[in-house]
Image (cartoon, rainbow, N blue to C red):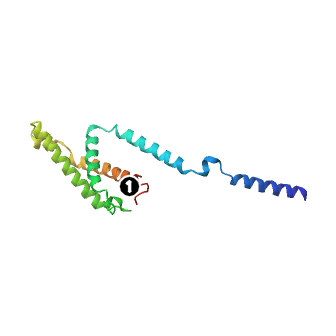
Amino acid sequence: MLSVYCDVHQMENCMNQSRILPFYMAYPLPLYYQEEDTVTRDLEYLQQMYPLEAKKYQKIIAETLDRLDYEGSMIYDEYPDRWQIYRLTQVIVDKIRKMEQEENVQEEVTSAQAVQEKDWDRISEFVQVLLCYEIYRKRHSNRNGILKF
C-alpha cells in the first residue's frame, strides 16, 4: 500500500514539474517579433539580389501598391479577386511598356522593334508573381502594430 502511495505521489510531482515553464517561454512574444524581424531582413537582403529588370518592375509595383494602401482596399481583402489582380497586373505592364518606349526613344532605337522583341506574356506573368508577393508583404507588414486583415 505504501508503494502505491509513493508511485502516485511521484506522478503528481512529475505532472506539477511539467507545468512549470522556463522563463523564456513565459513571455514568448518578444521572441516571435525577433524572428519576424529576422525573416523581414532576410527577404529584403534577397530582394537586393534581384536582376536589374526585376528590381525595376518591383519598384513600379511598389509605387502602384502604395497608392492602393488604404483601409478597405482590395489588397487587404481576405480573398482578393483573381480578376482584380489580373487587371492590376495589366495596368502595371502597360506602365512598364510606356516607360520602355520612352527609354527607347531617348536611346534613338526604334521602339516598335524593341517592344516586339520582348515576350510580354512572360513579363506579364512575372509581374503578376511579383505583385502577389508585394501584396503579401503589404498585408503582413506591422507598420500599424497589427496585421491588416
Disc 1 packing (10 Å; few <14; some 14–19; many ≥20): some
Which quadrant holds the N terminus? bottom right
- Indicate the quadrant where residue 70 lies: bottom left
Relative placement, left or right, of 128 versus 42 is left
Residue at image position (25%, 50%) is 124
Along the line of sight, which residue is nearer the eye, 72 or 83?
72
Is 108 rendered above or below residue 97?
above
Residue at image position (13%, 44%) is 101
The secondary structure type at the circle numbered 1 is helix
Q: How many marks?
A: 1
Relative placement, left or right, of 86 versus 9 is left
Relative placement, left or right, of 53 versus 13 is left
- Indicate the quadrant where residue 79 lies: bottom left
Which percent across, then down, holds residue 63?
A: 26, 49
Along the line of sight, which residue is nearer the eye, 99 or 35?
35
Q: Which residue is the site of mark 1?
A: 139
Residue at image position (58%, 51%) is 27
Which percent across, then down, holds residue 44?
A: 38, 41
Which percent across, then down, holds residue 149?
A: 40, 60
Which percent across, then down, holds residue 2?
A: 90, 57
Relative placement, left or right, of 56 versus 145 is left
- Indicate the quadrant where residue 109 lies: top left
Q: Which residue is farthest right?
A: 1
Amino acid tagged 1: Arg
Residue at image position (25%, 42%) is 56
